[in-house]
Amino acid sequence: MSEKLQNIINKQNQQQTAPDASQLEDVVQLVGFVVGVEEYSVPILSIQEIIKPIDWTRVPQTPGYVLGVFNLRGSVIPLIDLRQKFGLPELKHSDDTRFIVIRNEDEVAGFVIDRLTEAIRLKKSSIGPAPESIHAEESMIEGVGKQDDRILTILKVDKLLKRDF
Amino acid sequence: MDEFEEILQDFLVESFELIEQLDQDLVELETTPEDLELLNRIFRVAHTVKGASSFLNFDVLTHLTHHMENILNMARHGDLKINAGIMDVVLESIDLMKSLLVTIRDTGADQGIEVAECVNRLDIAAGGSGVEAPAAETAEVAVIEEAESSDEEEPDYDSMSDKEVEDEIERLLMERQQSDKAKRDAKKKAEAEVESAVGASAEEAIVAVKSKVEPASRPQKRPAAKKEDTAAVPTETKRAATTVEQTIRVDVKRLDHLMNLIGELVLGKNRLIKINDDVEERYEGEEFLEELNQVVSIVSLVTTDLQIAVMKTRMLPIGKVFNKFPRMIRDLSRELDKKIELEISGEDTELDKSIVEEIGDPLVHIIRNSCDHGVESAEDRATFGKPEMGIIGLKAYHEGNHIVVQITDDGKGLDTDVLKNIALDKGIISEKDADTMSEKEAFALIFKPGFSTAAEVTSVSGRGVGMDVVKTNIEKLNGLIDIDSEIGKGTSIKLKIPLTLAIIQALLVGVQEEYYAIPLASVLETVRISTEEIYTVENRSVMRLREEVLSLVHIGDIFDVERVFDASEYAYVVVLGLAESKIGLIVDSLVGQEEIVIKSMGEYLKGIEGIAGATIRGDGGVTLIVDVAALMHMAKSVKSTISTQTDVKSSMQEKTKASDYKVMIVDDSRTDRLIMQKSLESMGITLIEASDGQEALGILKQGEHDFDAMLIDIEMPRMDGYSLAGEIKKYNKYKNLPLIAVTSRTGKSDRMRGVESGMVEYITKPYSPDYLMSVVKRNIKFNLEM
């Protein structure tokens, strides 16, 4: 099943890049969500699905932000708490809590977020670079998007899915 | 081009299959050089490969096989007696043939390997044993002729014109069709006749076959032709018998895919069974249950059968691995100048393809070891009064869900003192270890990396690597190694390997609130012990298991499990065995045996120490699978906390006002909750409500409130009062929390159940508010004057 999905995602990626070059120049679609007080976002095409919290199993020998693994229709997928990953205190899951399942090539993981905001279309021109004070290579931040009066941080999907322990 | 590719693929597959058998046949031939049947079989391999390779224009291969065929043909006609010298050359040429085939497989051409020298030696071998060169020449001619006449093509097509080639092809096709037809007729006839009159007419049938086959293979010029013909007949009939068994070649990937699907199905089945159990509990006595039960049991039965059937398609006889050893032993015995014989049995024993592939290397190392260190030289053997010929036995057989491969030798055996001394010298063990070591533990030293008993490094062994490879590979397969040895008598090494890898039987164990699956292949036994039986020696926990001292480790210490439940007086010990070591794993509970499908946890969580993977349980939850090898390794460094029980810190705060007291009301009826609330209102204590057991347990687990008592209704959906009480009492923290049953059930047995599950009071509805208040007051030690 994962192969099929991958195909579809690949196809979508192609479709995404194809019109990009011709007419729909430089618009990115993002999904915004809140962790702590800040709003973050990831490209909509990297999201496999968004689900309500379900039970998970703790995996020993992992850092605290790796909550464990959960069963997504027969696949065993790691679950990462973004609050703890970002150094925020743990919080009890509420009705707004969601698991965002993000996929990059063959790697998949679920991320716990406080709540979803909305799907956003953003012109590339309104995305600024990540703050300079952070080391560009280690940073999880792809860039900072500005829309109307709000600012949202765009996260690097490959960095999110990279194991760093 | 595609068609050519296809033919090439078939050619390669066929050739490799033939060669596999060839090695064994050749070694056998050396001992029984007169066996015409064997000679013919070997000859046919060379012949087939030659025919096909010339057709595919592999000139080098054709050249080589042609000369091989030549020498074999002479042997089979009795013109040449096979001796060790000739056999060496023939084996060498077979090796060349193998590497040529490998080159063809990898590059598509047979260039880059020099065969001239070997061909030369083949010719010398053919001529040097008394047969005149011209005689060899005629033999060659005869061979060519036969090749042409039977079914393959030999003439030099390069020198033919297109027209000639066309004609030649037509001629060959005709010939082939005819011979095929003849064969078919012969076969049909033979079958029919064998069927109609078994035994009596068998001879007749053979004659019939013979007469039909004859036109296909034209009479030979040489006088030996008659002899050859008679020998060919039994093989022809044999072929007729074997073709009845039909086979299809299937890509392994398809089988793997099928296996994956079956895995999913097994998970589905487990889930179905679980749901069935739940439904059974809830709708006891309903009629549809019977039907549901039937369906579930059929589905689970069929799934199991299907799984076995698919597993069988992936099974290969272990003979595939064993086949290469006669040759290896032969080479080794010549190299080491020892006399060694290999006895193989149980080569038909089947096991999963993936395991067959993994087991080859370990066996090579063990057998090399037996040859080099085990079996003594012929002179030594003579002085010990043993027969000169050393015997190495290779045996495979089934034992439950395992296959056992046993390698025995009748050599000098392992000397534990020598082993210990070497290990001491190399710093692998300490003086103290050496003293306390059991015999088995000493034997196991040979598996330590860097350990070698050989005084010097030879080309065969002595580097101390081989046996370490054995251990790692067998551990990878979740296998066990058992060594037995007697000085002067010999050594026996047993490898116990599970039949399959993808779907395994596992023992599910519980620790606190978590569950883990342990591959059953590694579980030797389970025992229940009282905590008093655990001794501490040098900061390590051990127990006495019959005659042995078993070191213990708590699964909670390995996996950092939070201790929330009370440690009970008894502990379950799962005795794990892997390769040659043993350990006792302490768990809180044994859940049972279940069939599980191993799933990877993805890139992100790959290689977590102690975890081999995950599986999905019947209830849809994920359970982690324990990596026994890693666990044993981890156990060495884990500090024991079995005996040191953490004191539960009492978070009892001084109660200063009425609202400091907290009582939980658990009842599914709103009205009942309201009644209780009203009754207790006047006390001014804090009341928290829950509408069923699950919710109540959830509130407790969150730990936001410290409760002084709980009022629990018995009949509630999802989780009833008894189960709730049972769950609560599992927690250390709530051991002394007063639980008060408030119910309309008045039966004596109900009261008994209440007491059993840990309730301290039993209030029957209806009740007066005052009574309820006094009971609550008593239990929460309400001592504020108001």
Image (spheres, coloured by chain):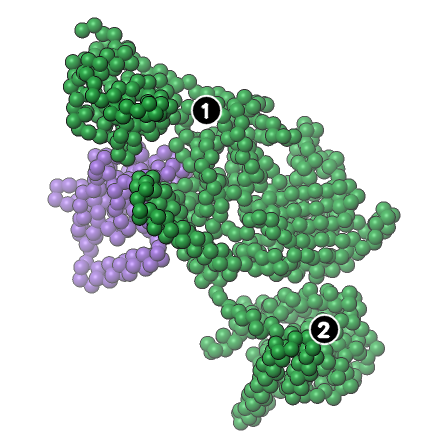
Q: Residue at x 22, y 22 (%)?
A: B765
Residue closest to the far top: B785
In the rendered image, residue A3, in percent from the top left (x then y), is placed at: 36, 57
Residue B54 visible? The answer is: no
Q: Residue at x 46, y 30 (%)?
A: B588
Q: Residue at x 23, y 9 (%)?
A: B656
- Badge 1, how many Cα within 10 Å: few under 14, some, many 20+? few
**Amino acid on which disc 2 is placed:** Glu
Sequence-wise first label, 1 or 2: 2
Mark 1 vs mark 2, CA separation in Å: 71 Å
Looking at the image, which is closer to me, B732 or B335?
B732
**Amino acid on which disc 1 is placed:** Ser
User: Which circle marks residue B37 in the picture?
Assistant: 2
User: Which circle marks residue B568 in the picture?
Assistant: 1
Chain A display color = purple
For marks 1 and 2, give the one nearer the viewer: 1
Describe residue B438's horizontal placement relative to residue B745 as left or right.
Answer: right
In the rendered image, the vertical position of residue B279 relative to residue B742, given as above or below = below
- Badge 2, how many Cα within 10 Å: few under 14, some, many 20+? some
Chain rendered green = B
Circle 1 marks a residue in which chain? B
- Helix, strand, or loop for circle 1? loop
CB contact under 8 Å: marks 1 and 2: no
- Helix, strand, or loop for circle 2? helix
Which quarter of the rendered picture does the C terminus of chain A lie within?
top left
Quarter-of-image position of residue B450: top right
Looking at the image, which is closer to me, B113 or A101?
A101
Looking at the image, which is closer to me, A111 or B162?
A111
Q: Residue at x 54, y 21 (%)?
A: B532
In the rendered image, the vertical position of residue B44 relative to residue A36, given as above or below = below
In the rendered image, the vertical position of residue B427 relative to residue A109, given as above or below = above
